[in-house]
Image (spheres, coloured by chain):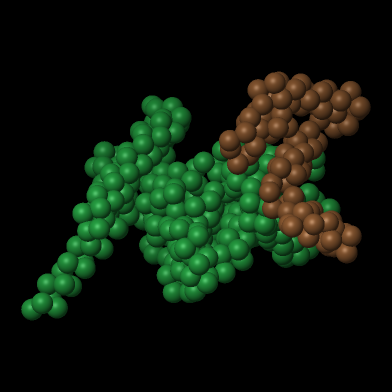
Chain colours: A green, B brown
Amino acid sequence: MIKGLTNKKKILKLNSSFISIYATIGLFIVLFLIGSVMFSGFFSGQVLANLFIDNAYLIVLAIGQTFVIITGGIDLSVGSMIAFISMITASLLQNGVNPFLVMIFVLIVSIVFGTVQGILVEKFDLHPWIVTLAGMFFARGSSYVISINTISIKNPVFTAISGFRIPIGPGVAISINVIVSLIVAAVAIFVLKYTRFGRTVYAIGGNENSAMLMGLNTGKVKIFVYTVSGFCSSLAGLLFTLYTLSGYGLHCLGTEMDAIAACVIGGILLTGGSGYPIGPVFGVLTMGIIQSLIMFQGNLNSWWTKIAIGMLLFIFIALQRIIVIREEKKKVVIS
Amino acid sequence: MELDAILATVIGGTSMAGGRFYLGGTVVGAIFIQALTTTIYSMGVAPEITLVVKAIVVIIVCIIQSEEFRKMLVRKKSKNNTTKSKPEKEVACV
């Protein structure tokens, strides 16, 4: 009896920490239902699959961002990393380098890039905003240095991967990008929940000093978090290159803000220490569904997406703040 | 543009960690940045490289300002001068 009661209480408690994610998932379902009622042809598997196909790179980006934000940092370089990666890929392919070597090379480049950012943040105690802002301009500038023109990709391997569709049902097909992004999401969920690294990430976000005093290796983990973000941004860059089949220095202007917005909508606190990696996935999907709603509507300017997302962000930040304040009040009563 | 504003403030000597600022320095920093940009243009170097240069300058200035970096430098120096500086320190302590 008592056990049952405590279990019930536990479930209720879990509810309060999951509330942001539930709100996002609920919003996603509501928006999808609204679309289905308003527009014929909206309620179909392919619309849902297209959400994943169009936003696969953003999902990967947001997952990388999640790790950094949970430690209380931020990574602004991810958007221009996509442009940088697409530029490197396109120009190397233009010169006839093996496509698989190119993929490995860009992944290594971004891992090095992310690690250097992490070392600057951790070893020299610089503010992550400044370091990653500089990283953002560095990546953007480097992609201009490679070329200021668009380079299209005509490599057969890339076009084959980009055009490949995997049928998952009647009239529904997804691309390889979707599978990669879902794998990344699954790995992130596993790592953050079940590994020592993941728990250390949460501990750093909660309170870095006490995590250090507990004997956790905060320095290494903080550097590694930026490495993960760098890796994810280059993976996202590859997915985006496959999606658009071109390299251009102006790709993804401001996408880092989309990734951060997806994290916030997905219930990850910008102050760090709380949130679940499934949240950003739904954050991205919610943003995507707003976009497709506006596309289906037809009359509205596509910039209404940004306005809607801005309002959503505000609502979700207010919601999070209310939750935090309520929890703090509870703590005060106990002590 | 964001980077330019931050760069101007940082070059002017404002501490990234907060608590120390020089408004006059910021003006000098802004002029410095424009000088840098104009130099790059007039030297005939591709203007695209400006962003990269600015990013590197920001990082270098930030590193120089950071306490940790200074400590590292001081440690290296004191390692070289340990034999000389030791007796002086003892005197100072007494």
Q: Quadrant of the C terminus of chain A?
A: bottom left
Please indicate, yes or no, whether residue A121 appears anywhere in the rendered image.
Answer: yes
Question: Which residue is painted at 56% across and 65% down in the image?
Answer: A218
The quadrant in which residue B57 appears is top right
Instruction: Please provide percent x and percent y for residue A295.
Output: 41, 36
Q: Please say whether residue A63 is visible from this viewpoint.
A: no
Residue B93 in the figure: left or right of residue B76: left
Q: Which residue ends up furthest to the front in the rendered image?
A: B94
Nearer to the camera, A91 or A201: A201
Q: Is residue A188 above or below residue B33?
A: below
Rendering coords of residue A53 (x, y %):
49, 53
Quadrant in which the N terminus of chain A is drawn: bottom left
**Drawn side of residue B39 relative to residue A179, left or right:** right
Instruction: Tell me what residue is drawn at x 85 percent, y 32 percent.
Output: B46
Q: Is residue A100 left or right of residue A256?
A: right
Q: Residue at x 86, y 25 (%)?
A: B39
The image quarter in which residue A274 lies = bottom left
x and y, in percent, of residue A226 in the image = 60, 57
Which of the pair A114/A41 is nearer the observer? A114
Horizontally, residue A86 falls left or right of residue A8, namely right
Q: Position of residue A55 (x, y in %)?
A: 49, 50
Q: Residue at x 44, y 74 (%)?
A: A194
